[in-house]
Amino acid sequence: MGDWAKRLAAKPLPALRDTHARLSRLVGREDTTNWQIEDILRRDPALALAVLGESNRQARRFRREDVTTFDSAIGLLGRERLKQIVRGLPELCTSLLDPLPKAGYLAVLARTLEAAQQAEDWALARREPVAEQHFHAALLAGAPELALWLEAPELAAQAYLLSQSDGLLIDQALSRVLDEDWPSVCARLVEPWGLPAWLTEVWSPAESVSAQAHGIRLARALAERIAHGWHTQASQALRPAIADHLALDEAVAWTRCQRTAVHGATGLLAAGMQPSAHTLAAADGSPWPFDAPLAPQAPARPSPLDTLRETLSGLSGSNAILQQLLKHLRAELGLQRLVLLMLDASHAQLEARFAVGLPAQDPLRGLSVPLSSGDLFSALLNKHQPLWLHAANRAAFLPRLPAEGRGPLAQADTFISPLRMDGKPVGLLLAQRPLDAPALTAEDFRLFNAMLAMAHETLDPRR
């Protein structure tokens, strides 16, 4: 391992104070869902690195496949270990980053988050099976440069200024300043940091790589170039490659990139970082105000969460709240097949109490499941964790389901979420799309969990 890789691997990347504080509070609560944890992990490369890194080191000890999603990492580590990792991670000491190092670190962090947003959006456009893997990969791919700003801020700043003066890519400038091939330095961090092994392909000098790695490379290159303007020659040069990657017309692909950048920039501004999306310019090169639309749009439609929030506002009574939740899940996510499994009086059995979108003979309608300490339904209820049962994990989870539930859930992708009222578990919600409908995606799962969280807030008057 080269000297620089050793130096960077020796120190943990500190978390941002705000995200660290929020996650520390969440992991200490029993009713926290995986989705709430993932939402914060996505905002901070240090937290992402700590959680995915530890889960990969653990997986490799048992010769398992790399962990590439936060949901899998949380499931592998368990809540207690996750709590230890988060609370043991140092916070970013801003006094060490002022003035130039702080500005440089935040600029790299903004660029990294923008690249992650683009990478995930492109994966969704390409209908990749697990789009969030692309977000996580692009996020982690920026971690070595962030670490360098903390370990050797003067050299990191020197490389940045060199890239500006000589028109070099930041990887080229870093290689020259450090007198060591920067992509090789990054690749040698895969093992000690517990990064997914395929990130070495992102940093590889090879031109021919997998579509997944190619997308991450493009997203990182775009984020670096648009920091100097959307209509610079360097930015425009990427348009054909991006269009080819997305299998879209150049103009359509470019507009999509701009929309994604504006969407991602909202969060960056809220975190006090300067996004490059503010440099968006019109086709003639004139400045484009940050809040201006990219193209004439239809009247804005409220988001699914805004619609549900307005519907639940002032609503009381668990039946009314659940009815509205199911209505919105059907309308917004196309989850036409919904079943409520409720605990009986003894809390020893789940019984189907309500079903919608299922024919009379569907076995889910009459599902009655006795609970035991080792089955998956009991675990979901006790830990209040949602689950997305799909082709990639079905073989692992089906044996853990109660025998009565295996047949009905053996084919269709299913979202399974615990239900709580007044802070206590009362049952499970099973949600599916029709078999001939588009497959469920990671974005669907995030929205599903967000809508459930909103309903739970209404169902729990103590919050």
Image (spheres, rainbow, N blue to C red):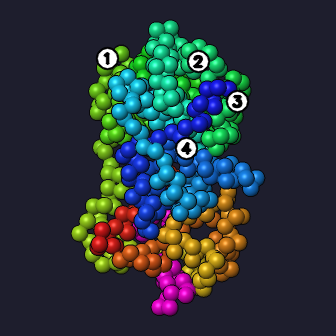
User: In front of the other: label 1 or label 3?
Assistant: 3
Work out whether mark 1 precedes mark 3 in sequence or the reverse, and give the earlier one.
3
Task: Read off the residue under disc 2.
Answer: 178
Task: From the viewer's perspective, tell me whether residue 312 is left or right of residue 214.
Answer: left
- Spatial CA distance of label 4 from label 3 is 20 Å
Q: Are marks 1 and 3 in contact (CB under 8 Å)?
A: no
**Neighbourhood count class around disc 4 (C-alpha, 10 Å): few under 14, some 14–19, many 20 upward:** many
* Residue drawn at (59%, 13%) of the image: 176
Task: Read off the residue under disc 4.
Answer: 49
* Residue drawn at (30%, 68%) of the image: 463
Q: Which residues are magenta?
A: 325-354
- Spatial CA distance of label 4 from label 1 is 39 Å
Work out whether mark 2 precedes mark 3 in sequence or the reverse, and give the earlier one.
3
Task: Read off the residue under disc 1.
Answer: 286
| Amino acid type indicated by mark 2 | Leu
Observer-nearest residue: 191 or 122? 191
| Amino acid type indicated by mark 4 | Leu
**Neighbourhood count class around disc 3 (C-alpha, 10 Å): few under 14, some 14–19, many 20 upward:** few
- Spatial CA distance of label 1 from label 3 is 48 Å
User: In front of the other: label 2 or label 1?
Assistant: 2
Q: Residue 65: in sight, yes or no?
A: no
In the rendering, at what x and y percent does residue 400 appear?
Answer: 67, 72
In the rendering, at what x and y percent does residue 234 appear?
Answer: 50, 16
Q: Is residue 330 magenta?
A: yes
Task: Read off the residue under disc 3.
Answer: 1
In the rendering, at what x and y percent does residue 76 appear?
Answer: 62, 59
